[in-house]
Image: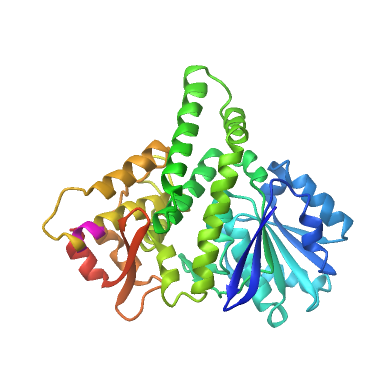
Amino acid sequence: MEQINIYSGKKAISRIVTSADFRDLASCLEPYPNIYAIIDAKVAQKCPALKQVADVLRRRGAKMMEVEAAEETKTLETVMGICGWLLENGADRDALLLAVGGGITTDMVGFAASIYKRGVRFAYIPTTLLSQVDAAIGGKTGVNFQKYKNILGVIRQPSFTYICPQVLESLPQRDFLSGVAEMLKTFIIEDGGNYQKAADLFFDISSEYHVEVMMYGKDGQAVWTDLLKKHRKTLNQLIAAAARVKAGVVSRDQFEKDERRKLNLGHTFAHAIETLAQKDGGERFETKGVTHGEAVAMGMVLAAKLADRYYRKDRNEPTELEGRLSSDLWDCNIPCFCPYTIQEMAQTMKKDKKAEGDKIHFVLPKAIGEVETVALTVEEVCRMMA
């Protein structure tokens, strides 16, 4: 077990526990007398590793509620439903809300905990790679509103986040790869030698998967599960490394006044892509839709293109970085070509929650491990990327 702290000044205000299994969960829950667990219904049905979690919760007498976690249900109505359930079950100010699920679940439960009785404690057990390396770390909570992502929410830190990569072995391949994009994003911001290590790992996994499934006709999910078990040690190391990067950034800038903005690499484009896909039913994508991680992958390539235009205005061909990101993402089997033009995304980007006046803080990658935040208007971006 490893513990990673998030600090406010010199005070630890949240902790991230990484463990190969759930044997340390009981001790993490010990200080909390009344536990209310909100669990993603799909995860409860499909993740065998969560049986250990359920056993711990039953021994503690925890009350449990299942929710439908999807972008369509990531709403105030669902949050109000959680608050109503808490009220019906006598949850007081000493309650601990425990979210078990991916980033949608942790976002909603963290938001519910922040407003129920003016704030109760909460904790997370993230069950997707995306939530383990990004969404469940740092205290951002929120819901979608009027088809705009995470436009309502607060920043408030969980008491703890328990990361166990064992739960990923039953995660569908596409959902797992969505998290790979966020992991690569983290290492583009702060490398430490981990970007290439991650790109190599997921290229190897993707290659082995295609050999076993395409050439030998084996069952895809079984092959995928076996490959994650085979590479579990390296995967665990990379997840912990990504968590350390994000915890460090959040400790230095909890409320996104400066450095934390870097974590939004690719996200202004990504949120516009997701909003447009929701409006048109995702018909422009080969997969008939887009995951958050896929949108982030597309957004990072667009950010690299914007960086090219911003820093080297006389250049039109792709830079080495733009080409490298595209190649690495494709090698990991993550689609990264955006089907929307910059002009189509413009109006949606103007409503980005990170906008200040008429400018948005775009994160521009200059090299692996080096990014810069630049305030630009959407009109300036459109001119540079036309």
Q: Quadrant of the C terminus?
A: bottom left
In the image, 324 versus 248, the foreground residue is 248
Q: Residue at x 32, y 81 (%)?
A: 357
Residue 240 visible somewhere in the drawing: yes
Q: Position of residue 20 (x, y in %)?
A: 69, 46
- The prevailing secondary structure element of the residues shown in magenta is helix
Vertical comparison of 215 with 165: above or below? above
Q: Is residue 211 left or right of residue 327?
A: right
Picture quadrant where residue 276 is located? bottom left
Q: Position of residue 175 (x, y in %)?
A: 53, 45
Residue farthest to the left, as pictured: 314
Q: Residue at x 51, y 49 (%)?
A: 179
Q: Is residue 51 left or right of residue 336?
A: right
Vertical comparison of 167 with 342: above or below? above
Whether residue 308 is in magenta: the answer is yes
Q: Residue at x 38, y 46 (%)?
A: 283
Residue farthest to the top, as pictured: 216
